[in-house]
Amino acid sequence: MKYSDIKQMVFSKDDVLSAVKHARKEHFEDNLRNRNEFVAFDSKARGYLGEIYLKKLFESNDIEILKIDYEIDGFETDIDFVIKNKDNESLKIECKTSLIPDVYKTLENSINKCDIKIIRREKHYTSIPIDVHVQIYYDELRNERDSRLSSIIGAVSDYNDEEIIDVLELEKIDGYFVAWIDKNSLNEYLEKLPMYSRLWKFGFRFFWKCPLLISRAPSDLIDFLKR
């Protein structure tokens, strides 16, 4: 894929409200780094916005959704979607959302430098239980946003839904469906790499290497799921 392939996501006010309400219900376990409450809640809400976008994309293209948000027995993995393709096969889809690393400054630079976030939870990449990994980016610098949100006074529970949307500026941040990769393509890529270069680290976690530039364009996803 390339920068010109990315798709901007469009959300309604109801979408944002739905994401905030969902975020309030779910316990947030920060498995990447220690974060302020507002920073963690923002990450959770943006994650649900990404799911809302994909759900609408699937439904508008007659992709049958079997399950949303569940855990695989024996794995830490949270599956965002299970869909059915035309051969009645079920495919597991995981959606990851990110902010722009400050060192890269722009979304375009991030696409040229960054990877799809595929957390290493298994000993070998061939054991990854996900069939399709989707990467979404929000166009704001991570440290800059974290710093602003960390300065908010009080607790998330002090704000109603409209107020939390306002203080987090959730309606102002632009989101983009950037890339995706299927299991076979990921395995083929990792197989060619030396063992020592198959992983990278951020915060508390290791990730499987998967550069955005070797991944697939958003416009190809529906055809892949329908094949």
Image: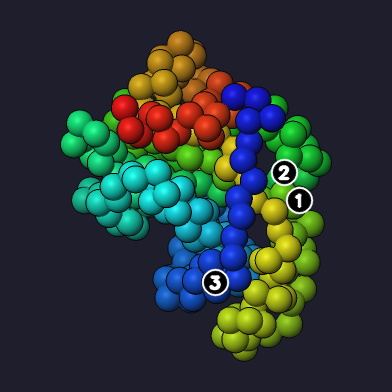
Circles 2, 1 touching at the beta carbon (< 8 Å): yes
State left or right for residue 76 relative to residue 107. Answer: left
Q: Horizontal and vertical percent for residue 188?
A: 40, 16
Picture disc at residue 55:
none
N-terminal of the pair, mark 2 or mark 1, is: 2
Q: Give me the C-alpha separation between circle 3 and circle 2.
A: 29 Å
Mark 1 nearby-residue class (10 Å; few <14, some 14–19, many ≥20): some
Say what secondary structure mark 2 lies in. loop
- Amino acid type of the residue tagged 2 in the rendering: Pro
Question: Which dot, 3 or 1, sits closer to the camera?
Answer: 3
Picture disc at residue 141:
1
Q: Horizontal and vertical percent for residue 163?
A: 67, 82
* Residue located at (63% from left, 30% from top): 5
The residue closer to the viewer here, 8 or 69, is: 8
The quadrant of the image that shows the N terminus is: top right
N-terminal of the pair, mark 3 or mark 2, is: 3
The residue closer to the viewer here, 150 or 186, is: 186
Circles 3, 1 touching at the beta carbon (< 8 Å): no
* Vertical arrangement, residue 16 with respect to residue 55, above or below: below
* Vertical arrangement, residue 37 with respect to residue 49, above or below: below
State left or right for residue 107 relative to residue 30. Answer: right
Mark 3 nearby-residue class (10 Å; few <14, some 14–19, many ≥20): few
Say what secondary structure mark 3 lies in. helix
Residue found at the very far left of the displayed protein: 88
- Amino acid type of the residue tagged 1 in the rendering: Leu
Circles 3, 2 touching at the beta carbon (< 8 Å): no
Q: Give me the C-alpha separation between circle 3 and circle 1.
A: 25 Å
The residue wearing badge 2 is 101
Picture disc at residue 14:
3
| Residue 30 appears in the rendering | no
The quadrant of the image that shows the C terminus is: top left
Q: How is the image coloured?
A: rainbow
